[in-house]
Image (cartoon, helix red, strand yellow):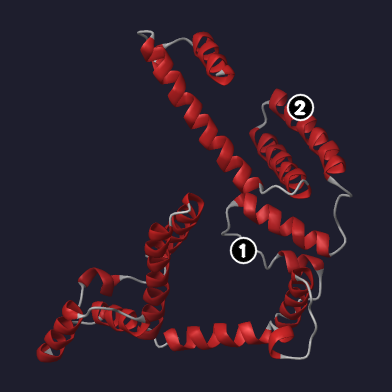
Amino acid sequence: MKEIREKSINKYISEEKFGFEDLVAIMSLLRSEEGCPWDREQNHASIRQNLIEECYEAVEAIDRKDDALLCEEIGDVLMQVVFHAEIAKSEKSFDISDVCDGVCRKLIHRHPHVFGDTVAATSGEVLRNWDEIKKKDKAISSGSSVMNTVSRSLPALMRAEKVQKKAKHEGFDFKDAGEASAKLSEELSEFSEAVSKGDKAEIKEELGDLIFSAVNVARLSGVSAEEALTFSTDKFVERYEKCEKLASSEGKTFSALPMKEKDEYWERVKKL
């Protein structure tokens, strides 16, 4: 066993170019008795967060338009996929070949316009066909069942948008962004009333309704609510940093200033 291990290690140390099979083999080695104690101790739940974080880091690389970073980050995502497959293999549940087999079969099955006789000339038709095939595959017969296929683990804004899109396919939607904006104003009034009462449970409910309505307005305006909020958060941090620098240039510490003076700096930065 020791000789086999040393032979494998020497092979990978001297390798000039690795492939997918090498990744699987390396992960298998790390999970073995001759491998790494930490890797061997992990299970699906213990590395669940790692998969989420790696996906977000890959998305950030896309946003930065950094190809070198994206190559690295999707490699980390792939590593997590192989890691979970190796865990499943040790539990005699499935392995990476089952994962590949399943996704290949799904791609072939859900692209009948490529692998069959179905005609789909536009991306819209492709998506409609995909949804219809998915409904049949999962025996989905009601609108609520369709909405329940949207993962609850998604970020809340993304989940809200996907649920709203499912509702639209069921014929339940606002006519346009203007109609959705009217509902947003209504929800804002209800939220303000809840705040005035000071009832935390009611505030939580009405705030959720308000945000859900804002997502509707964004969606019907052709804007991603998730991206819009990310942009506004980045803008807030950037302005705060400029306020700090401006205050410092005038011999002041921004964080130590009274709120009224902070607001004055904020307005000055906005005008800049």
Q: Position of residue 51 (x, y in %)?
A: 43, 64
Local SS, label 2? helix
Residue lying at 61% horizontally and 47% vertically, measured from the top left:
226
User: Viewed as shown, does residue 246 lie left or right of 158?
Assistant: left
Q: What label sits on residue 151 in the rendered view?
A: 1
Sequence-wise, which precedes: disc 1 or disc 2? 1
Toward which corner of the image does residue 154 lie, by quadrant? bottom right
Residue 268 appears in the rendering: yes
Relative to 173, say whether 40 is above or below: below
Residue lying at 50% horizontally and 9% vertically, measured from the top left:
261
Residue that mark 2 sits on: 193
Q: Residues within 10 Å of mark 1 (few under 14, many from 20)?
A: few
Foreground residue among 87 and 63: 63
- Quadrant in which the N terminus appears: bottom left
Residue lying at 82% horizontally and 59% vertically, measured from the top left:
168
Foreground residue among 258 and 113: 113
What is the distance, in whole Å, between disc 1 and disc 2 at their CAs?
A: 32 Å
Q: Position of residue 159 (x, y in %)?
A: 65, 56
Foreground residue among 207 and 99: 99
Amino acid at dot 1 = Ser
Amino acid at dot 2 = Glu
- Quadrant in which the C terminus appears: top right
Local SS, label 1? loop
Toward which corner of the image does residue 233 lie, by quadrant? top right
